[in-house]
Image: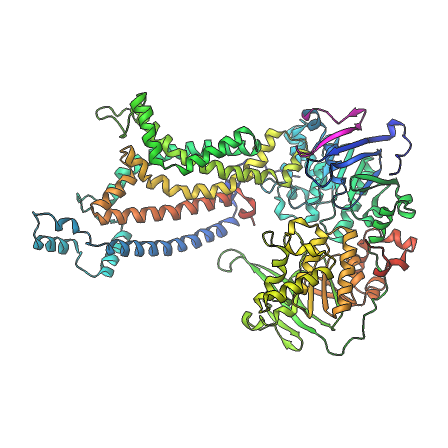
């Protein structure tokens, strides 16, 4: 009678690709979201471009105080870079090049914006990826345990700990970390991504420990709070009682019924985290002199390196859009109500 | 309290509860959820435990299953199952019994199934949890069970997710799950309360059939004596944690000895077959005249993927005279609630006209309709969700009229008068909704609707969420209010028994259309459409009570009320 194989968990994803009915619906959904995203990106870029150019002095202000540059030199430079044209023409020119894959060139050293971003992306990905993975795993565990052992000593400690981690600024944790683990104990280096002249994997990891732990503190706090609420919510659902009435063990109830349902809202949260994974953490990267995207943004602003700043702005806007899109697709894949509804 | 029946030979008893006392955490309104309750469930019988909410019937069931929340625990007494005392058994031994020896089904089939697992996987889980069978044998057993509970196309159903199923189908899945390991005892905690009358009749029939076929013992919890009459072999009546009466179904139904039992039985609305006597002769003009009203729901976008079109209200026409009540009766999905929303313009109709006091309001814009809004008010179904928990009752009552320009002082005065009128004491004004019971909250909801001195009240399943005994009180209140104020009413319900208590005329809705319209006497005694006959036949307990010819005491005035 029934010859279909027992559905494994990834069945949903498989079915999603294979099921002929799903393809038009899902591509329709994607098309719809992508068209919304394009509009969003245009708006963000216009606002970003305008606000950036409204800053007093403009991109060449730094040369105004340079005794080696005459007013003529500055004007010549402005003509050369096309900065004397009306703003809207500058924007259209910039946008048109962007569409062709030319993100412009850094004012600082003339290298292409994409190359500059690429140089810093890996460092950020390493730091943020490690700390986010750690934060999600630890935060989810604390949250689930806090919910199943509600009002226990563990739960109270986790709650107070989360409040402390959320209310104390990250740089303070960073400085305290450096003071204790570098200056007093000498366990880890105080900053940078690698020792010049070394650069082995172990050396990278050694440098990674402290900044990623400091960075993950706040995220552990956030994740544990959200996860605790979501788990409590799932625990109070009737189907958990049904599972108990069936004689299912508490462990399996937690793993199969509670965590699955509690993770659904977490996927959206993780989607919103994606941009920050790639755009970096300004404060942490500064404290630990980590050569990531956060530092790049700060430095580029300081040098009025408008093409790089604009590039970073568009890059993070694309990530926001992408993060939400991926979260939506994952939710649609794991939740049959959305996938098949 | 009546004494427990004579102890039977132990092999005839599937489950015996003896002097069970379950304590509540300190600070609750009473110290014990159940106190000294004793009863026996005989093998192969259906025992109904009946009582209002808060009577301790669900707590008793959960105590047997070992499913009490941590804060509530068994204080004393014993629960004997196959010679074992379940009280004090280790959690692991209790887990082993659950689903294998004792199974349970719950009230709300919508939330009782895990939305992320297929129906088949959830049925197999019972067997897997007790290590029964191989994955292959479990699958064929699951499909067998789906067939047994009468679900269509079991192999397809096996792969279905719960959200695709109707309420009745989900309850069948729950039953299939409970039967998977052929338990000796099935505990059903209000399994039909959340269902339509016709679905309820089918599920009751299914439980009865399976119980007979398998010789199972069933403990059936309900608040409705109509259901008891339909299904029970013996009955335990509970009030505020005490067992006040028990005996065979016939004995308790025919000659109830306890006052509380009599009150519960009297509260069950019966089909009267008699028409209501209106307060005054109907005026010639109608207050509401609806013509060819149409509302179609469209979901999904036409551009991407297929569009679903649901005709919710499909050419409905009726007339309502001032001071009269029109009952709109139908199953869920019949379009009766959509009709209510159209009339109060919470939804816009696609076509047709709504003539209110002679003017067509169907095409009015929100701004144009606003001055008329106070004249049409709604009473909602869920008395727990429809009152803002952060506002005092006084604020809830006065916020609307004040928005429409009534001075604050007058509004407060009027609110206090109305609260007294609907039977609530003066302190109510400054208290918050969570301090009240369901029935009291519904009284607050009625007072809120009356604040505007409306011409038309729309009551959407206004008593469906209430216990049968509270239902009767609210219906009496609505009847009294109509006689005093001359307000017209549209009473939307899925329960024909309730409609027969309060309506001058009844419109039966089916798939967006009115299939029959007439006075209760015609609808109940002489239904012309097949669908109405089906609805009437599905009413629980009617065959029995008709046979006993209760008839004469079934008008509202004849009931005893608190």
Q: Which quadrant holds the N terminus of chain A?
A: top right
> Which of B547/B79 is in front?
B79
Q: State the image coordinates of residue B549 (x, y, percent, origin top left).
A: 92, 56
Relative to B488, is B303 on the left or the right? Answer: left
Relative to B152, is B118 on the left or the right? Answer: left
Report the residue at 60% width, 58% height from top.
B395
Q: Which residues are magenta?
A: B67-91
Relative to A120, residue A71 above or below: below
> Which of A96/A24 is in front?
A96
For residue B382, what is the image quadrant? bottom right
Q: State the image coordinates of residue B535 (x, y, percent, origin top left).
A: 78, 57
Relative to A157, residue B146 above or below: below
Relative to B546, residue B176 above or below: above
Q: State the image coordinates of residue B204 (x, y, percent, origin top left).
A: 79, 46
Relative to A210, is B36 on the left or the right? Answer: right
Residue B73 part of the magenta-drawn span: yes
């Amino acid at each position: 009678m029934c010859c279909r194989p027992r559905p494994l968990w990834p069945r949903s994803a498989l079915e999603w690709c294979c099921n002929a009915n799903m393809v038009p619906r899902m591509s329709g959904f994607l098309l719809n979201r992508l068209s919304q995203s394009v509009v969003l990106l245009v708006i963000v870029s216009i606002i970003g471009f305008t606000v950036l150019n409204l800053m007093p002095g403009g991109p060449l202000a730094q040369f105004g105080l340079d005794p080696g540059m005459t007013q003529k030199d500055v004007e010549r430079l402005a003509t050369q870079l096309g900065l004397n044209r009306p703003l809207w023409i500058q924007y259209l020119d910039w946008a048109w090049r962007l569409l062709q894959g030319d993100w412009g060139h850094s004012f600082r050293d003339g290298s292409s914006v994409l190359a500059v971003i690429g140089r810093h992306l890996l460092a950020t990905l390493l730091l943020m990826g490690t700390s986010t993975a750690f934060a999600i795993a630890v935060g989810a565990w604390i949250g689930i345990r806090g919910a199943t052992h509600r009002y226990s000593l563990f739960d109270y400690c986790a709650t107070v700990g989360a409040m402390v981690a959320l209310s104390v600024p990250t740089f303070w944790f960073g400085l305290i970390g450096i003071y204790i683990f570098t200056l007093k104990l000498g366990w880890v280096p105080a900053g940078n991504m690698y020792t010049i002249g070394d650069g082995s994997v172990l050396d990278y990891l050694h440098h990674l420990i402290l900044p990623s732990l400091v960075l993950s503190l706040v995220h552990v706090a956030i994740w544990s709070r959200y996860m605790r609420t979501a788990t409590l919510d799932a625990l109070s659902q009737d189907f958990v009682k049904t599972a108990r009435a069936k004689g299912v063990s508490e462990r399996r109830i937690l793993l199969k019924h509670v965590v699955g349902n509690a993770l659904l809202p977490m996927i959206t949260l993780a989607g919103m985290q994606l941009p920050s994974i790639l755009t970096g953490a300004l404060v942490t990267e500064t404290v630990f002199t980590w050569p990531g995207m956060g530092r790049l943004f700060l430095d580029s602003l300081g040098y009025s390196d408008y093409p790089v700043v604009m590039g970073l702005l568009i890059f993070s806007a694309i990530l926001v859009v992408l993060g939400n899109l991926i979260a939506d697709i994952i939710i649609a894949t794991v939740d049959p109500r959305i996938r098949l509804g | 309290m009546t004494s427990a029946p004579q102890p039977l030979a132990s092999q005839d008893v599937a489950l015996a509860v003896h002097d069970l006392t379950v304590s509540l955490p300190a600070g609750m309104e009473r110290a014990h959820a159940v106190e000294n309750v004793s009863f026996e469930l005989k093998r192969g019988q259906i025992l109904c435990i009946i009582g209002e909410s808060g009577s301790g019937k669900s707590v008793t069931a959960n105590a047997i299953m070992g499913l009490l929340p941590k804060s509530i625990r068994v204080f004393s007494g014993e629960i004997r199952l196959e010679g074992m005392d379940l009280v004090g058994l280790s959690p692991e031994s209790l887990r082993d019994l659950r689903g294998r020896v004792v199974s349970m089904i719950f009230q709300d089939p919508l939330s009782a199934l895990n939305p992320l697992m297929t129906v088949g996987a959830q049925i197999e889980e019972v067997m897997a949890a007790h290590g029964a069978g191989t994955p292959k044998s479990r699958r064929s057993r699951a499909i067998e069970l789906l067939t047994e509970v009468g679900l269509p196309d079991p192999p397809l159903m096996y792969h279905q997710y719960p959200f695709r199923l109707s309420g009745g189908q989900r309850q069948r899945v729950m039953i299939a799950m409970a039967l998977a390991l052929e338990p000796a005892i099935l505990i059903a905690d209000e399994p039909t309360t959340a269902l339509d009358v016709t679905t309820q009749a089918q599920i009751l029939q299914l439980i009865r059939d399976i119980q007979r076929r398998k010789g199972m013992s069933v403990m059936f919890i309900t608040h409705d004596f109509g259901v008891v009459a339909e299904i029970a072999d013996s009955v335990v009546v509970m009030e505020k944690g005490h067992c006040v009466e028990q005996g065979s179904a016939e004995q308790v139904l025919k000659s109830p000895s306890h006052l509380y039992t009599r009150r519960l039985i009297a509260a069950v609305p019966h089909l009267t077959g008699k028409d209501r006597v209106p307060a005054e002769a109907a005026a010639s003009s109608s207050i509401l005249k609806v013509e060819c009203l149409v509302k179609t729901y469209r979901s999904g976008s036409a551009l991407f993927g297929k569009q679903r079109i649901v005709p919710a209200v499909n050419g409905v026409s009726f007339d309502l005279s001032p001071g009269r009540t029109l009952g709109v009766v139908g199953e869920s999905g019949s379009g009766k609630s959509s009709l209510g929303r159209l009339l109060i313009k919470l939804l816009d109709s696609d076509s047709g006209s709504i003539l209110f006091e002679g003017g067509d309001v169907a095409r009015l814009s929100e701004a144009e309709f606003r001055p008329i809004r106070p004249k049409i008010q709604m009473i909602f179904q869920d008395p727990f969700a429809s009152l803002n928990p952060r506002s005092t009752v006084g604020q809830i009552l006065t916020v609307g009229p004040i928005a429409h320009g009534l001075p604050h002082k007058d509004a407060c005065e009027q609110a206090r008068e109305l609260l007294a009128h609907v039977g609530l004491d003066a302190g109510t004004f400054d208290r918050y909704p969570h301090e009240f019971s369901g029935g009291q909250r519904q009284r607050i909801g009625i007072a809120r609707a009356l604040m505007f001195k409306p011409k038309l009240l729309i009551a959407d399943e206004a008593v469906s969420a209430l216990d049968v005994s509270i239902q009767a009180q609210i219906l009496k209140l609505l009847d009294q209010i109509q006689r005093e104020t001359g307000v017209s009413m549209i009473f939307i319900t899925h329960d024909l028994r309730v409609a027969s208590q309060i309506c001058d005329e009844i419109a039966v809705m089916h798939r967006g259309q009115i299939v029959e319209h007439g006075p209760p006497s015609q609808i109940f005694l002489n239904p012309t459409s097949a669908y109405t006959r089906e609805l009437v036949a599905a009413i629980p307990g009617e065959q029995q009570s008709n046979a006993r010819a209760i008839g004469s005491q079934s008008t509202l005035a004849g009931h005893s009320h608190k």
